[in-house]
Amino acid sequence: MSTPGSSPTRATTPETTEGSAVGSDPPKGGAGAGETWAVLRMMRWSAEYLEEKGVERGRLDAEYLLAHALGTRRLQLYLQYDRPLTPTELDAYRPLLLRRARREPLQYIIGTAGFRELELAVDPRVLIPRPETEVLVQMVLDRVEGREDLTALDLGTGSGAIALSLAKEGPFVRLVATDDSADALEVARSNAEAAELAGRVEFRRGSLFEPVAGETFDVVVSNPPYVARTEEDGLEPEVAAWEPADALFAGPDGLEVLRRIAGDAPTFVEPGGLLALEVGAGQAATVSEGLRDTGAWSEVGTEKDLAGRERVVWAVRASGPDGTPPPDAA
Ligand SMILES: C[S@@+](CC[C@H](N)C(=O)[O-])C[C@H]1O[C@@H](n2cnc3c(N)ncnc32)[C@H](O)[C@@H]1O
């Protein structure tokens, strides 16, 4: 992970009492710093500074970073608006602010991302888990409600977000999580340990279904890479420059990995079992159609994300040669 340099090239302190961040660099705490920086003043200055650098929610991010530097919770800052920051605190905060100004994602700087009931460690070896994926997990949990002793497979587990959430919240006795990135699996394993779920999820390295050849599961779930290479230029710097390319891109139209999963899934999903896939905006119809065309699924449907876009495609594995589902279909 890169850290910003410590020699600012422009003015080091704001000129007015309130301070304007425009054209300035973050204040230093060391000798020669001179000025008093109270919590509220620093938050306001930082918000303007980050927004000048193109960060969308400058104030919120500044609050998270300052809280992290001070070893406190964000809301605690609201109770100490007038408290002057010590030189040590300023020195702890400054590099974090500089990193965010370089558009490094907030979660990589802080080192964690919240996902459903979990606090996951994240760094540039893994994708930062997204709220859309929480919807995917919820959809799976809703569909298996009331059932017991299920098995599940999470393809492309990254930080472990999906597999660990299913282990924590669902009726699963056995979960396998795969990824072809050894780095990602290292992060996922350590998240499993931290969440005390290591005994419940088995992590295996390999491409898609390769590590589970010959096995079947009640649920197969995946948030695979689905960004089209042609969309690379339109991505925010936080994504394009920091998140792992292998977690993002899937060929010229973004559907390369989804096609492979849809093609192989019938072999690995139990009759009556569930396949649940996160897809990119605008991809749901194509993926659903591809699944229907195989004739392997008795039911195919979609689910909307929090913004009302169809971002999950699910399918129930047919059980008989005529495609009829068994009576206890998920
Ligand atoms: C979009 S990320 C999802 C990470 C995590 N499941 C989540 O939802 O936050 C996709 C993951 O799939 C992995 N991946 C990409 N291609 C793969 C392949 N062919 N086989 C296995 N894993 C793959 C990447 O390394 C990455 O961790």
Image (cartoon, rainbow, N blue to C red):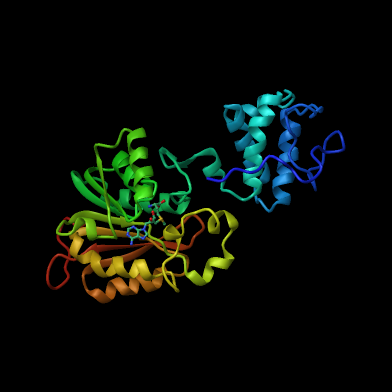
Specify the quarter for ligand 1: bottom left
Image coords of residue 95 (percent x, y): 64, 38
Q: How many marks?
A: 0
Q: Between 165 and 194, which is closer to the camera in this rendering?
A: 194
Q: Is residue 17 above or below residue 166?
A: above
- Name the side, left or right, on which 305 lies relative to 70: left
Residue at (29% x, 36% y) in the render: 197
Q: Is residue 179 left or right of residue 317?
A: right
Quarter of the image where the C terminus is located = bottom left
Where residue 257 sits, quadrant-wise, is bottom left
Q: Which residue is the extreme one toward the right?
A: 16
Q: Residue at x 69, y 30 (%)?
A: 90
| Image position of 104 (left or right of 192) | right
Q: Is residue 138 in view from this perspective?
A: no
Q: Residue at 29% of width from left, 60% of height from top?
A: 207
Q: Nearer the viewer, residue 191 or 301?
A: 191
Percent across and percent down for residue 319 are 14, 65
Please say if 269 is above or below 165.
below
Q: Position of residue 58 (x, y in %)?
A: 67, 45
**Image quarter of residue 10:** top right
Q: Residue 85 sits in which quadrant?
A: top right
Residue 99 point in image, percent of width and height: 62, 44
Q: Residue furthest left?
A: 321
- Residue 283 in sight here: yes
